[in-house]
Image (spheres, rainbow, N blue to C red):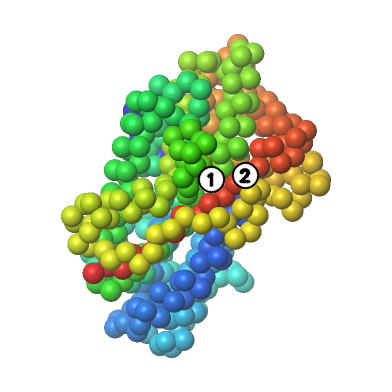
Amino acid sequence: MPDEQRSTEGMVDYNRNSAMQQQLVNHHAGCIRDLVRRIGSVQREFRVVDYGCGPGQSAVDAVAPAIEAYRALDPVTPISVCHADQPGNDWNSLFELVSGPSGYLAPFIRSGAAVGSFYDRMAADGSVDLGTCFMASHWLSHAVRLDAPGSVWFADLKGKARADMAALARNDWIRFLDCRASELRSGGYLLVSCLGAVPDDGEINGIAASGRKVYRAIDSVAQEMADEGLIDQAVLDRFVFGVWFMTAHEARSPLETEPELAEAFEIEDIKVVPAPSNPSDIYADVIGDPAEYARLYVGYVRGFGHSTLQRQLFEPGAANGRSADDIAQAFYRRLGERYTQNPGKHAGETWYLTVVLRKR
């Protein structure tokens, strides 16, 4: 059953722990410039919307190549940049960056925000020339609670739990695309890139998903704490991260089988590839320093996962009179010990899904 809480609500330490997001955005800078050149000069204003922007430098980096490329085509037509995200985003931090030394504000560039969920409409019909979405659409529309003992994430689910979450993920992807189909103008482009998965017959459900060892380390620590009576086992058995990392086939299927989407979009590219840097271990560069290696991985988990863990596991599952904060502290300490004692064993592997669509 979905929970009304947004999947990403309350993320912590985002900018300090968003190296993966920044790498992904920078990797696509050339693609963004190329899409802008394909769109060409427009009348009135050129409008870019970055969906699920977040509060960090990656949000600025996502639109800077578009501005650069469009200014090379047209030095005077106004440019409108819209950062779109949920109410809980740290908007003050974002717009400090936008207006700061590394920002993009200049004459004839207008910056603003659309506040809400990208699973709903966030712009007017036919108003968007270029839409981007980085490291965000793998988060489902709502937090998820399932009868799923033995796993805290989608890739290891079995039976009905797997089927229910797969249906939710497909429906969310269709909702996302439906909204963008309305918002993009004819000839506009949508670029989506996030964590993905690849076929692997040796894995549960036949896929290898990004971060599989990280999520299994999280699961191992949580189960150890449940075995010791620190976390309520019944709560853990229903806890699942609200993410789904699609294969290329899963991303493509609705665009070919849903008539309205097939009519709305021309598929330019859909692929899943290894990350261009450290695809087998996000922090391979520091593996020789176990303490730093562990610190970075704990920070990474806190950055994407703390709000989910705190609200859906630590708070409802705290047992034997311990507070949620006590449980969180013990959890991150134990997680860090795993990375310190066995560097590389729980390495974060990364595959990127990229989808490029043209609005007909």
- Give x and y (percent) for residue 1: 34, 28
The residue lying at 35 percent from left, 41 percent from top is 169
Residue at image position (46%, 45%) is 199
Q: Label 1, on which residue?
A: 210
- Report if residue 347 is visible in the image: yes
Q: How far from the left and from the top, in percent, is residue 82?
A: 40, 65
Q: Does residue 56 show up?
A: no
Q: Amino acid at mark 2?
A: Gly
| SS for dot 2 | loop
- Pinpoint residue 6: horizontal percent, then vertical percent: 40, 40
Taking the spot 46% from the left edge, 71% from the top edge, the residue there is 32
Q: Secondary structure at mark 1?
A: loop
Q: Which residue appears farthest toward the right when viewing the image? A: 289
Whether label 2 touches label 1, CB < 8 Å: yes
At 76% from the left and 50% from the top, the residue drawn is: 286
Under mark 1, the amino acid is Ser
Is tag 2's residue or tag 1's residue first in the polypeptide sequence? Answer: 1
All told, the count of numbered labels is 2
Image position, residue 90 (x, y; %): 51, 51
Q: In the rendered view, would you say 56 is above or below 102?
A: above
Mark 2: few/some/many CA within 10 Å (<14, 14-19, 20+): many
Say which mark, if any, is on residue 229: none
From the image, tell me which residue sits under label 2. 348
Image quadrant where one finds the C terminus:
bottom left
How far apart are the two marked residues, 2 and 1, measured between alpha carbons? 7 Å
Q: Is residue 47 above or below residue 94?
A: below
- Nearest the eye: 169 or 44: 169
